[in-house]
């Protein structure tokens, strides 16, 4: 049946294949389809169509059977997913259940996954801070990992490009450490946060900054958002349910429907990518092997360019599992570094305190973001006993003390008689961690999952640098809180909290200048297989301290532009 | 509970006439459907009476008309581990004996005022059977949670807005005479 085979190959051939429809995959889909490329997006999870598949989005609190608590069974069956702060009755359907994809924890690691259209872009915390040259130059200056092959100027126009489409609420702070972007109106800091900002600026001679956290919420009506069918953020603060207004950015609300409208997008759901096919003769990747999650049938799809956006660990897995004569240890893995130099963000510690000023003021309404403190440690030069530093979230709210005294009429009265307390202030650390060769992902040689794909082994832990950083964060924030006259200052370190709940796992397929010491070049192409691009968290050479999604989006748009230009040259 | 007593006597007569001595029929109750817990109708009624005492009907709806008893059962059924469930049910099942030992009557036979006094005393007692004490405190805490999450409370007493609108977040100077809305 030669004709049938030819037809089937033809039907399964596209101009580009994008593996994953999340934060970065959605961008690849948008960029390629917009430029006229017939694009196949492979999503291993189910379809989640914007609005239609947000089952809880318009529920009132009393319509949730368990008052937004997850059931005992849901927690017991999903000990990993249930540890995520966002795993609630109204959002649990967007989390991949633990049994879907078991993995081996050589050391404890909570791997949070969201397999569906849009991936974790439905669940993210929407903080969008740019990475600066202080971050890009970090590894070279401090002697860890390898030098990034790009600098801020390479990415800056792509940050702008992405931000204008995403919609970023922010303030122009003019900080080198955290470059400004294309901002829409700020939702503002509250008076206690503003007070802390002034105290910190004064005490540290304008070397430490408390700013409004830049976030992916639309706060001004613009044509570009209307074209996407997105409206202004209605400050519901229910983002985890999926936003019916498209007020925050998700692939579901933005890039995927945009790509669909071009008529050039083909999306396959329940499409678990087994591996990328490498052709020894053509010396390039020709397609991917996909397993249907329901039928377990295997299909091959072909394209001259392949974008790997499966999420950091899954992108590593797919490359490690893509074995050929040319690449017996995984696609592009000539130097044996694939799956190594994994890192994450250290979110283990937080602080809380009270403030007894501003007692004549309160806030009302809900703000889906908070304050942000960019890294202030080791910025210009090494000055502590640990490498790099940390950014921090910061927020204040007026405490309302809710009573539930007595029984009977007294109790009912008590329940409608709340009182103002002090302001409560809080901060959490977002620490850069050092990618190390011994921090690895690998495939188990025996155990496989329900699709016959080898189980992932994760070997990652906090190190001495992380511990020193935690100590310093607590010391510095205690000092800053004391300077502001805050009281009841407490540090909350949870030493047995495994890495992973930051959901910022990165690396394993790092970018670099030298094919001997890195996997990807400055355009996110595999050095050894240039028609495969990796533009999700796996590509990160170092982690910086900033929430990384914005950077993945910018890198993706930039890499797509490169791939399109290369294809016009007839190289790819 | 005069109402219940009245219903009961009425029920006995009717039941006698119809030769159907079924309590559930007499009270026209539909038993709550639970996934794991097996509870009797008497236990359902007892919890309802306790919640009616803790959050009575006044000029605003009480716990029972807001069906908070169902919330308490559902949370215990779906969101608690077996040990918590067993402890709770053990406390509930010792409750009547404890009341009878200390006050000489079944809880259900006390009038509303007496019920309130009894619950208050029991919850403050230092010598109370710990399971009963824990049962009462869990009931109160869960009932309060359900009450504050109820449509009535979140609509009439502390109004919640699902869609506050753009830029709803504001700071304001407190007017001491204004009531605080915890859901504002």
Image (cartoon, coloured by chain):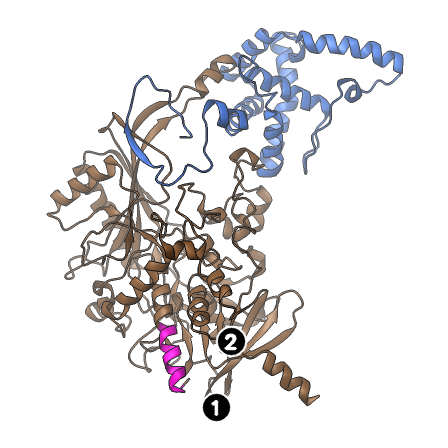
On screen, B100 above or below B135? Answer: above
- In this figure, which residue is indicated by the disc labeled 2? A321
Q: CA distance from mark 1 to mark 2?
A: 20 Å
Q: Residue furthest left?
A: A205
Secondary structure category for the residue under label 1: loop
On screen, A546 above or below A219? Answer: below
Query: Which is nearer the eye, A161 or A415?
Result: A161
Magenta span main SS: helix
Instruction: Note the chain letter of the blue one.
Output: B
Marks 1 and 2 share the same chain = yes
Where residue A83 sits in the image (x, y, percent)?
Answer: 47, 48
- In this figure, which residue is indicated by the disc labeled 1? A282
Instruction: Note the chain letter of the brown one.
Output: A
Query: Which is nearer the eye, B130 or B142?
Result: B142
Residue positioned 48% across, 71% down in the render: A18
Total label count? 2
Residue A564 lies in the magenta stretch: yes
Where residue B76 sits in the image (x, y, percent)?
Answer: 60, 33
Visible residue check, residue A442: no
């Amino acid at each position: 049946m030669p004709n049938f085979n030819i037809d089937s190959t033809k039907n399964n051939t596209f101009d580009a294949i994008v593996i994953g429809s999340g934060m970065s995959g959605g961008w690849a889909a948008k960029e390629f389809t917009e430029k006229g490329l017939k694009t196949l997006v492979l999503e291993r999870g189910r379809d989640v169509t914007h609005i239609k598949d947000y089952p809880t989005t318009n529920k009132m609190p009393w319509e949730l059977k368990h008052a937004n608590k997850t059931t005992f069974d849901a927690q017991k069956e999903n000990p990993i997913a249930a540890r995520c702060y966002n795993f609630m009755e109204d959002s649990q359907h967007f989390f991949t259940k633990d049994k879907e994809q078991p993995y081996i924890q050589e050391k404890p690691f909570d791997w949070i996954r969201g397999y569906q259209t849009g991936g974790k872009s439905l669940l993210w915390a929407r903080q969008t801070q740019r990475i600066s040259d202080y971050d890009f130059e970090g590894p070279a200056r401090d002697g860890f990992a390898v030098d990034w092959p790009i600098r801020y100027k390479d990415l800056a126009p792509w940050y702008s490009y992405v931000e204008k489409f995403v919609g970023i609420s922010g303030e122009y702070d003019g900080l080198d450490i955290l470059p400004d972007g294309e901002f829409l109106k700020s939702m503002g800091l509250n008076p206690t946060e503003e007070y802390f900002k002034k105290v910190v600026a004064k005490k540290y001679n304008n070397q430490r900054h408390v700013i409004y956290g830049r976030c992916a919420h639309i706060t001004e009506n613009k044509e570009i958002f209307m074209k996407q069918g997105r409206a202004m953020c209605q400050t519901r603060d229910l983002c985890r349910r999926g936003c019916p207004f498209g007020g925050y950015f998700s692939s579901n609300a933005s890039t995927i429907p945009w790509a669909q409208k071009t008529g050039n997008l083909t999306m396959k759901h329940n499409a678990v990518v087994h591996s990328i096919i490498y052709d020894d003769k053509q010396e390039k990747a020709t397609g991917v092997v996909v397993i249907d999650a329901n039928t377990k049938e295997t299909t091959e799809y072909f394209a001259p360019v392949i974008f790997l956006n499966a999420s950091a660990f899954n992108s590593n897995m797919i490359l490690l599992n893509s074995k050929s004569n040319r690449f017996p240890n995984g696609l592009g893995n000539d130097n044996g570094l694939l799956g190594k130099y994994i890192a994450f963000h250290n979110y283990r510690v937080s602080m809380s305190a009270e403030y007894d000023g501003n007692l004549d003021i309160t806030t009302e309404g809900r703000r889906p973001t908070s304050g942000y403190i960019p890294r202030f440690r080791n910025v210009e030069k090494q000055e502590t006993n640990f490498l790099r530093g940390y950014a921090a979230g910061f927020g204040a709210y007026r405490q309302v003390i809710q009573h539930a005294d007595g029984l009977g009429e007294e109790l009912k009265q008590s329940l409608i008689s709340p009182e103002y307390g002090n302001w409560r202030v809080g901060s959490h650390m977002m620490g850069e961690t050092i990618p190390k060769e011994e921090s690895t992902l690998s495939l188990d040689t025996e155990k496989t999952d329900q699709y016959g794909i080898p189980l992932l082994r994760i070997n990652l832990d906090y190190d001495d640098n992380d511990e020193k950083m935690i100590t310093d964060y607590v010391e510095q924030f205690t000092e800053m809180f004391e300077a502001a006259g805050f009281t009841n200052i407490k540090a909350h370190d949870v030493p047995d909290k495994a890495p992973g709940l930051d959901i910022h796992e990165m690396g394993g397929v790092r970018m670099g200048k030298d094919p001997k010491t890195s996997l990807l070049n400055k355009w996110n192409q595999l050095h050894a297989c240039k028609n495969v691009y990796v533009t999700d968290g796996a590509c990160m050479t170092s982690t910086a301290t900033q929430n990384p999604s914005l950077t993945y989006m910018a890198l993706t748009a930039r890499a797509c532009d490169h791939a399109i230009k290369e294809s016009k040259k007839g190289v790819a | 509970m005069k109402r219940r007593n009245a219903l009961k006597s009425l029920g006995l007569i009717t039941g006698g006439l119809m030769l159907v001595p079924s309590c559930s029929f007499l009270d026209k109750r539909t038993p709550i459907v639970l996934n794991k817990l097996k509870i009797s109708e008497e236990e359902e009624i007892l919890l309802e009476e306790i919640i009616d005492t803790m959050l009575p009907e006044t000029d605003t709806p009480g716990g029972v008309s807001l069906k908070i008893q169902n919330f308490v059962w559902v949370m215990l059924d779906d969101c608690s581990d077996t040990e918590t469930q067993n402890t709770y049910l053990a406390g509930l099942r010792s409750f009547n004996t404890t009341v009878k030992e200390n006050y000489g009557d079944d809880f259900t036979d006390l009038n509303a005022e007496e019920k309130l006094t009894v619950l208050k005393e029991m919850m403050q007692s230092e010598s109370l059977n710990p399971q009963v004490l824990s049962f009462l405190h869990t009931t109160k805490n869960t009932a309060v949670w359900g009450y504050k999450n109820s449509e009535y409370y979140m609509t009439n007493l502390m109004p919640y807005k699902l869609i506050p609108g753009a830029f709803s977040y504001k700071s304001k100077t407190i007017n001491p005479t204004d009531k605080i809305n915890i859901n504002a």
